[in-house]
Image: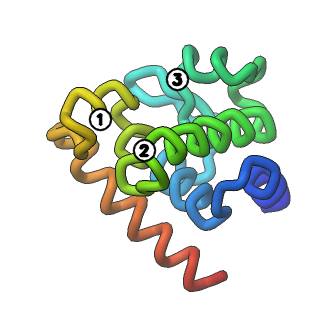
């Protein structure tokens, strides 16, 4: 989508990774709400949305821009390690740091990371 392409270029995150996260998080459903309260296409928690200046969490452009900026910050925080950035996107950066910069041993995160990376490879191949 053009919103994803624009946000990816603006914030320097591979568009294939953004598509992978959206596929895993919401299946492109802008109205999605998780049990934990994450919302929108990139399933932002309200605190994360607020941190990134997202006012309307269900607005696709705002949600994607906030989510992509968060992803970029996580990639930077974990020195370009996509696996850890994706784990942190799911479990929170503090969980990854607490577990010695490894994927936290939470069932959801352990399943989430390979799922996202699988989508990522697929979208990269599709170019």
Q: Dot 1 surroundings within 10 Å: few (below 14), some, or many (20 or more)?
A: many
Q: Position of residue 45 (x, y in %)?
A: 52, 23
| Mark closest to the chain's N terminus, 3 or 1 | 3
Residue drawn at x 60%, y 44% is 72
Residue drawn at x 48%, y 39% is 77
* Residues at discs 1 and 2 in contact (Cβ within 8 Å): yes
- Between the residue at mark 3 and the residue at mark 1, the CA separation in whole angstroms equals 17 Å
Look at the picture and state if 59 lies above or below 10.
Answer: above
Q: Position of residue 18 (x, y in %)?
A: 61, 55
| Mark closest to the chain's N terminus, 3 or 2 | 3
- Between the residue at mark 3 and the residue at mark 2, the CA separation in whole angstroms equals 20 Å
In the picture, the quarter occupied by the N terminus is: bottom right
Say what secondary structure mark 2 lies in.
loop
Q: Dot 2 surroundings within 10 Å: few (below 14), some, or many (20 or more)?
A: some
Give the residue at mark 3: 45
Q: Quadrant of residue 51?
A: top right
Q: Nearer the viewer, mark 3 or mark 2?
A: 2
- Residue 78, numbered label: 2
Q: Dot 3 surroundings within 10 Å: few (below 14), some, or many (20 or more)?
A: some
Q: Nearer the viewer, mark 1 or mark 2?
A: 2
Give the residue at mark 1: 96
| Mark closest to the chain's N terminus, 1 or 2 | 2
Residue drawn at x 34%, y 25% is 94
């Amino acid at each position: 989508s053009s919103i994803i392409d624009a946000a990816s270029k603006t914030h320097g995150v591979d568009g294939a990774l953004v598509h992978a996260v959206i596929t895993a998080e919401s299946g492109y459903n802008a109205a999605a709400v998780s049990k934990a309260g994450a919302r929108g296409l990139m399933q932002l928690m309200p605190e994360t949305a607020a941190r990134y200046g997202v006012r309307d969490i269900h607005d696709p452009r705002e949600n994607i821009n906030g989510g992509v900026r968060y992803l970029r910050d996580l990639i930077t925080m974990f020195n370009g390690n996509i696996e850890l950035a994706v784990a942190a996107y799911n479990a929170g950066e503090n969980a990854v740091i607490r577990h010695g910069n490894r994927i936290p041993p939470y069932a959801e995160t352990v399943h989430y990371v390979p799922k996202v990376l699988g989508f990522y490879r697929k979208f990269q191949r599709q170019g």
